[in-house]
Amino acid sequence: MLQDLAAVDTHTLAATAARYVGLLPLIPLAGFLVNGALSLIPAYTMGPGDPSAAGHDHDGAAAAHAHDVDHAEQSGATGDDHHAVARHPYAAVASVVGPLVLVLSFALAVAIWLAMASAGEMNTPYVQRFFDWMVTGDLKISWAFQVDQLSMIMVLVITGVGMLIHIFSIGYMGDDPGYPRFFAYLNLFVAFMLVLVLGASYPVMFVGWEGVGLCSYLLIGFWFSDKANADAGKKAFIVNRIGDVGFLLGMFLLFANAGTLDFTGVAASASSLGYDSALVTTICLFFFLGCVGKSAQLPLYVWLPDAMAGPTPVSALIHAATMVTAGVYLIARSGFLFAMSPTACITVAVVGTLTALFAATIGLKQWDIKKVLAYSTISQLGYMFMGVGAGAYAAGMFHLVTHAFFKALLFLGSGSVIFAMHRAYHHTGSHEDAQDMRNMGGLRKYMPITFVLMWIATLSIAGVPPFSGFFSKDGILGAVFARAQHGALADATWLGMPGSAVLYVLYALGLVTAFLTAIYMTRLMLYTFHGPNRTGDAEQAHLAEAPWSMTGPLVVLGVLSAAGGWLDLPAALPLGPVGVLEKWLDPVVGAATAAVAGTATEAVTSTEYFLIGAAVVIAILGIVVAVARLKPAALVPKRDALPSHGFEHVLEEKYYVDEIYDDAIVHPLVSGSRNVLWTGIDRGIIDSLFVNGSAVLARGFGWIGSQLQSGETGAYAWAIAIGALAVLGAFTFR
Amino acid sequence: MISEALFFSAVLFTIGVVGVLTRRNAIIIFMCVELMLNAVNLSFIALSRLHGSTNGQVFVLFVMTIAAAEAAVGLAIIISIFRHHKSVDLRNINLLKG
Amino acid sequence: MNTLVYTFHFYLFGLLAIASALAFVTRKSPVAAALWLVNTMFCLSALYVMLDAQFIGAVQVLVYAGAIMVVFLFVVMLLNLGQASDITDIRGLGGRLMAGLVGLAMLAELFALSRLHFPRLMGAMTDHANIVNPVSGPLFQEYLLPFEVTSVVLLVAVVGAVVLAKRGDNVS
């Protein structure tokens, strides 16, 4: 089926820049190879007499590490992420190659997008097939890329935001000994992510899916000589894998029943799977399991907060803008499947909403600035799933795009803050935690540009108009409310409850979450930028704005966060062209959206005004409550902080979820593996019984054989006689 | 008569086998082997008579010739063993042990 | 051919052969054993003649009893093994019982095999005039090659026997 479409060179895009879509992942891949080659050259170290090496017991060990030439990678990893020991000799080359490939990719993406935009109506995707990948029996999977409106949105976000983050990394990671390795992994990640969104079939997408998981592991554990970082990387990879099993099972079921795995083919045969049948629901839920793992929803979200152990640009790119949104993309892409199963849709929406609420509560009480943003990411991803679960694919994608803008801005901004804090501590030789908000405060005096930009992002995420987050969040909440009133979801039942009731509850929870979002983000801003400074008098002299290579991208993201709302204005607020994004995505997700929602894609205009009003009021109320109740002046630095009690403590300890998982799942598995599988089966049965046992058996037979060689001729005569008897017997009794 | 002859042959052969298994003197054992060969000769002759041709008898000639050659060589071996061990008892000839 | 006299003599010589063989196997003295074996061969020769293999019967006496057994006796004499030893070289009771069992088993099997196809009575012999010709004919025509090879074997055996029985080369 793929061939029939690809053979159609008469597709409107065939003669345009879109025919170079195959290059799109190859450019970052080339960057990976170049940077990877550079990273294999070890960083030379500073001598022990270097003044900046004095006073840090880490650095002595790091210098010893860097001497270890046979393990070139190790030389790039120091014990901690904050003290640069030795700049890589080819850092300058990496600084050019790394971001350059992203700039080139972005340029190509823009060219393809322009070609699409000027081509006018495009109802079928442009599929370019490269080669046959797996051909066996009924299974025919080709390596093919699909250029359509949905994939191009993702490509633009990935390459655009990615490009900004790469430029930011030049300043942030420039002094790290493993700097080329960083860009290598980052480029590889972008390559895989592009494969993920450009794939024309589930298997190709899965290649990208797994690849980004791998890169996430590599990047989270970038400073792997600190075991905690390596553990965080492992945790991310393993938890992701649990979800990937779901993806695989979904693919298997899909192939067994639909006979095809490419998107166009499945879309065509989706209706044959039976509306709201157990089969289609199972397939959808398996795919959603993959999303739960990759996009950090309940219960597989635990890896994302730990992933903050990686460098901040990694957190910005992977764990805010791109990789974690792969799940949302998957569901949007599989709209034709989910449209067949209201049960699965509502399940997705419920899980998303609960995750959003759950993570928002935890975010209220975190002190590490990156952890707050991590839980905020989980919460916002919950919103996106609420959107696509309710069948509002365009709204979910819109929130994905705006979230990429303001979350990347928040992470990079916090990166600037951490960078400044580190520099300050480095100068004074202090070992305080540079990421804890209790050590910050009043930074707006020292970092005004970052301060303004972070407030733009905060207002955006809280949902205050006219920033982009307001429009996207309102889009989702409005869509949920509309579908609660009538449509396929409202008519369906979920676990015995009527769908409309469930959706109304989800809407209410969404508002509560918005309230909490406003609170914790304002809290972050208050503790970091307002109030008195708690960093210390000696450090204050060194707090300053980050260099322009880092602040520049922040400004761009700030503009996008502020103005991004114009991408998809609701009909109720025609401040410009209405629903640009929705119309753009209509050829891809329009059918699925209509199947789920019927006519209720948006609420009636009067209701819509009410909903918008409610959202704005909630957001502003949250900010006001936060400002009124939280006293930044009352905070003490981390080292003097008193432990918290009661429910506060539970929130601070993230509801002890990690500990519960450890005790309930991890420890039994590990001890079971060690004691039963390793000691019992591997050593006891396989080693002792089979391997050693067969040796013993062979020796035994050999011993028996040796007893026959007694050397006594008489015994040999006996043997001949017995043998003759046996042969005669064979003849006699034949 | 043929089957009687074959019966005699079988009995003689068995006596030869029992002799080989029972005795320990190398020369006696050798002679038992000769007895076995003779038994086989009787079989050949009887069956040759059955078929009415003389091919079996020709073969008996060959058996006898080879038995003679074998006896010569075998006894020479026994002589050289005797020179080494000063005895022809089979218990002492166990250099094949291994 | 199948007269009573014939049958009687056939059985006589047959049983004599078996009795001699039994005596041979149970003698303690090698010389006595050898002589009993010679007797066995005489009886067998008689059986051969009665089975119309007159030439072979003659050759049996000439070669087997007259040459081979004589060589055996020479060796016994040479190695001075003639006396019956006090320490018997017959195996113990257990060994003899086991050997007996093996023997009985073998006999039973041979009996079963031979019982099957062979007639009790003989047919008439075709040619009485020629005794040597029927043997020598195939010997020098059909079986010429084995004949020649056998002569080579004899040569090798002679050489081998001389070499093996020679006294080892002492210091010249």
Image: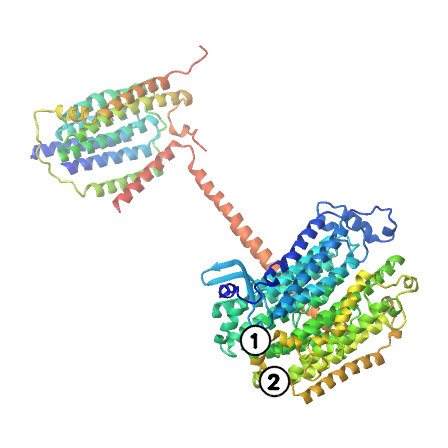
Left or right position of A66 against C135? right
Tell which subunit mark 2 falls on: A
Disc tally is 2
Measure how far apart labels 2 and 1 are at the Cα level.
17 Å
Dot 1 falls on a residue whose secondary structure is: helix
SS at badge 2: loop
Query: Dot 2, crowdedness within 10 Å: few (<14), some or many (≥20)?
Result: many
Say which of marks 2 and 1 sits in front. 2
Whether residue A234 is visible, yes or no, is no
Residue farthest bottom in this picture: A606
Q: Residue A72 bears which disc, if any?
A: none
Residue A346, compared with residue B93, is above or below; it is: below
The front one of A195 and A121 is A121
In the image, taking residue A481 as reference, residue C107 lies left or right, namely left
Type of the residue with mark 2 = Ala
Quadrant of the rendered image containing residue B86: top left
Residue C54 point in image, percent of width and height: 14, 26
Locate residue A363: give its quadrant. bottom right
Note whether A95 is above or below A263 in the view shown.
above
In the displayed structure, does residue A447 sit left or right of residue B52?
right
A331 and C29: which is toward the camera: A331
* A493 lies above or below A117: below
Q: Which residue is mark 2?
A: A600
Return the residue at label 1: A338
